[in-house]
């Protein structure tokens, strides 16, 4: 009886768990290419001032990418598995949050 209660609580989340596993496994088996590394390799994420300077320069070139570029300066120095895990989490999070926009709970 207790097993049924646990399963009934987990059951609504099974599609999201499967989505996460699918995306994560897809990341593991596809080749990891980081073309951004060539663009960001001159910026040291250990030096925050240098990274902020880079973000300011990029703002004047392409303002909509400022936050993205500032984040990528750090992500390109991490091992690929971290990016693969974070990307899987964010995509699954989007799948969890989007229905909340369209479905009104009573």
Image (cartoon, grey):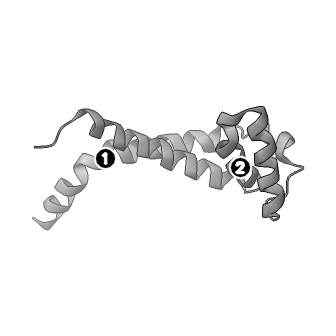
Instruction: Sort mark 2 into few (<14), some (14-19) or many (20+) by Cα contacts within 10 Å.
Output: some
Q: Is residue 89 left or right of residue 66?
A: left
Q: Is residue 47 above or below residue 95?
A: below
The image position of residue 8, as x and y in percent, is: 17, 54
82 or 67: nearer the viewer: 67
The image position of residue 42, as x and y in percent, is: 90, 50
The image position of residue 37, as x and y in percent, is: 81, 44
- Mark toward the viewer: 2 or 1: 2
Name the residue furthest right: 42
The image position of residue 72, as x and y in percent, is: 71, 47
The image quarter containing residue 104 is top left
Q: Residue at x 79, y 55 (%)?
A: 51
The C terminus sits in image quarter: top left
Q: Is residue 78 left or right of residue 20?
A: right
36 or 8: nearer the viewer: 36
Q: How many marks?
A: 2
Q: Which residue is mark 1?
A: 14
Considering only order in the chain, which callout, 1 or 2, is on the residue closer to the N terminus? 1
Q: Residue at x 78, y 33 (%)?
A: 61
36 or 71: nearer the viewer: 71
Q: Residue at x 64, y 55 (%)?
A: 82
Q: Is residue 33 visible?
A: no
Q: Which residue is mark 2?
A: 70
Name the residue furthest front: 60
The N terminus sits in image quarter: bottom left
Q: Which mark is residue 23?
A: none
Asked whether disc 2 touches disc 1, contact meaning CB atoms under 8 Å apart, the reply is no
Q: Secondary structure at mark 1?
A: helix
The image quarter containing residue 79 is bottom right
């Amino acid at each position: 009886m207790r097993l049924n209660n646990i399963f009934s609580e987990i059951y609504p989340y099974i599609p999201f768990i499967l989505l996460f596993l699918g995306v994560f496994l897809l990341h593991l088996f596809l080749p990891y290419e980081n073309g951004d590394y060539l663009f960001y390799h001159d910026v040291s994420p250990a030096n925050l001032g240098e990274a902020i300077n880079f973000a300011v320069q990029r703002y004047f070139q392409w303002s909509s990418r400022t936050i993205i570029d500032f984040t990528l300066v750090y992500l390109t120095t991490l091992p690929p598995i971290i990016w693969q895990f974070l990307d899987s989490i964010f995509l699954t999070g989007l799948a969890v949050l989007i229905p909340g926009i369209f479905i009104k709970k009573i």
